[in-house]
Image (cartoon, rainbow, N blue to C red):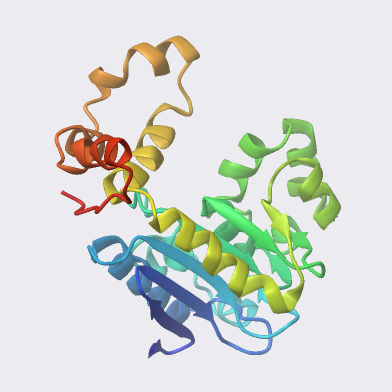
């Protein structure tokens, strides 16, 4: 395990577990944002890592968002929070490895924006969501105003963003914003089990799946289905030319488990 200020990084095989550990609310200041950016860059660039899990220490907060003490000091420019933008993940758009959010409690402001940037989300029963930004004099522009209206009906998203009301776990379940609600003591084991299942797939296939989803999500069905070759996506190209592309069908016909090389 490595520690970078208020961020703990634990490696478990092909899985990187990134834990926010900044009592009382795991709020994010510049140092924490930079540590998160470093953690996610390391995850992106390490060929031995396939899936990341981001979670919080403690039982009450996943993340309380931007540290208001630091905000009051005049920090305004998102670039001051380091590479990847605020919390190091929401602008890391070239990371095609999946990230799982394991929400262990209140998910507020920038904490919710971290969750919105993740591919899969598990939550405990005490998880609630909140964007209080307009009541603090700014907006949720580290992914909140950009991603929430794409995940919810626009009028629901606008209500949440404009009124600053709490968004309850039952609503998140109803709108398909989380994959599962699990007891607190099962949260990390379930996230690890989910990550291990993903790791059973061919690494390039996993990455190409995320790459293609992201590249086509704003296209029409016709454009997405007929224009994949024109998109010229590098991971997808590597997957199609890889030895794993042959290994999968070969292992199936031989009745054995595939041996992936990632090449």
Q: Is residue 193 left or right of residue 159?
A: left
In this rendering, position of residue 119 left or right of residue 83: right
Q: How many tags in the picture? A: 0
**Residue 262: percent from left, percent from top:** 21, 52
List x then y, in percent, for residue 99.
Answer: 47, 58
Query: Which of 22 and 57 lies nearest the eye of the viewer?
Result: 57
**Front-most of 26 and 48?**
48
In the rendering, at what x and y percent does residue 158 appear? Answer: 75, 39
240 above or below 51? above
> What quarter of the picture does the N terminus occupy?
bottom left
Q: Is residue 260 above or below residue 219?
A: below
Q: Is residue 4 visible?
A: yes
Q: Residue furthest front?
A: 255
Q: Nearer the viewer, residue 234 or 112?
A: 234
Give the residue at x 44% y 9%.
Answer: 222
Q: Is residue 73 above or below residue 88?
A: below
Question: Relative to residue 117, is residue 31 depicted above or below?
Answer: below
Residue 198 x/y as whole percent = 44, 54
Residue 77 in view, yes or no: no
Q: Examine the image and state in which quarter residue 13 appears.
A: bottom left
Residue located 65% across and 60% down the image = 122
Question: In the figure, residue 145 lies in which quadrant?
Answer: top right
């Amino acid at each position: 395990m490595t520690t970078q200020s208020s961020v703990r990084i634990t490696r478990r095989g092909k899985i990187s577990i990134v834990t926010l550990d900044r009592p009382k609310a795991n709020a994010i200041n510049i140092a924490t944002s930079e540590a998160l950016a470093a953690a996610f860059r390391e995850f992106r660039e390490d060929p031995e890592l396939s899936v990341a899990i981001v979670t919080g220490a403690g039982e009450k907060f996943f993340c309380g968002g931007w540290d208001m003490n630091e905000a009051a000091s005049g920090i305004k420019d998102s670039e001051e929070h380091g590479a990847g933008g605020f919390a190091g993940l929401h602008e890391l758009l070239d990371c095609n490895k999946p990230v799982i959010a394991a929400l262990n409690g209140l998910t507020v402001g920038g904490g919710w924006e971290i969750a919105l940037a993740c591919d899969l989300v598990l939550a405990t029963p005490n998880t609630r969501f909140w964007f209080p930004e307009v009541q603090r004099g700014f907006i949720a522009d580290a992914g909140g105003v950009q991603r929430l209206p794409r995940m919810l009906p626009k009028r629901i998203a606008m209500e949440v963003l404009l009124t600053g009301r709490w968004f309850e776990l039952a609503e998140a379940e109803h709108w398909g914003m989380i994959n599962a609600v699990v007891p607190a003591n099962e949260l990390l084991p379930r996230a690890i089990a989910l990550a291990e299942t993903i790791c059973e797939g061919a690494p390039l296939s996993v990455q190409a799946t995320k790459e293609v989803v992201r590249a086509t999500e704003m296209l029409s069905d016709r454009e997405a289905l007929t224009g994949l070759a024109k998109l010229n996506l590098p991971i997808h190209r590597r997957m199609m030319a890889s030895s794993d592309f042959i290994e999968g069908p070969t292992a199936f016909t031989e009745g054995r488990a595939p041996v992936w090389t990632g090449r």
